[in-house]
Image (cartoon, rainbow, N blue to C red):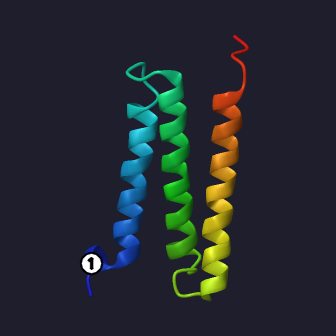
Amino acid sequence: MSALHQRVTKVWLALMVLTAMTTWGLSSDLFSPAVAVTGIFLIAAVKVRFVMLDFMELRHGPIRVRIAFQGWLAVVVALILGMWLLAPNIL
């Protein structure tokens, strides 16, 4: 099987595209800060999920571990975004 057809190669390419999106797309002045921060955190959550499932091999792990990990990720992202979006504007 060639390297281009392996799942980890496709995941790595997806991680590179997502990194480019956050670096050049969402960090520019095209979007409001709330939209940019929300997008960056959601893309970061997707990237963490890819890394944990494919590079740390949780994809074939016990279902309880996968559910705990994905639940933890959802809670952390929700808490961070909730605190950021609901905090009074300091600037």
Does 57 sit left or right of 10 as displayed?
A: right
The quarter holding residue 24 reads: top left
Most extreme residue toward the top is 91
- Pointer 1 local density, CA inside 10 Å: few below 14, some 14–19, many at least 20: few
Residue at x-position 48% and y-position 31%: 36
Residue at x-position 41% and y-position 64%: 12
From the image, tell me which residue sits under label 1: 5
Three-letter code for the amino acid on which mark 1 is drawn: His
Residue at x-position 27% and y-position 73%: 4
Above or below, comparing residue 1 to residue 22 in the picture: below
Above or below, comparing residue 51 to residue 19 in the picture: below
In the rendering, at what x and y percent does residue 29 appear?
42, 18
* Of 59 and 11, the residue lying toward us: 59
Most extreme residue toward the front is 86
Task: Look at the image and tell me in which quarter the N terminus lies.
Answer: bottom left
* Of 28 and 87, the residue lying toward us: 87
Residue at x-position 41% and y-position 23%: 31
Element under label 1?
helix
In the rendering, at what x and y percent does residue 18 appear?
41, 49
Task: Look at the image and tell me in which quarter the C terminus lies.
Answer: top right
In the rendering, at what x and y percent does residue 84 appear?
67, 32
In the rendering, at what x and y percent does residue 13 appear?
35, 60
Above or below, comparing residue 36 to residue 7 in the picture: above
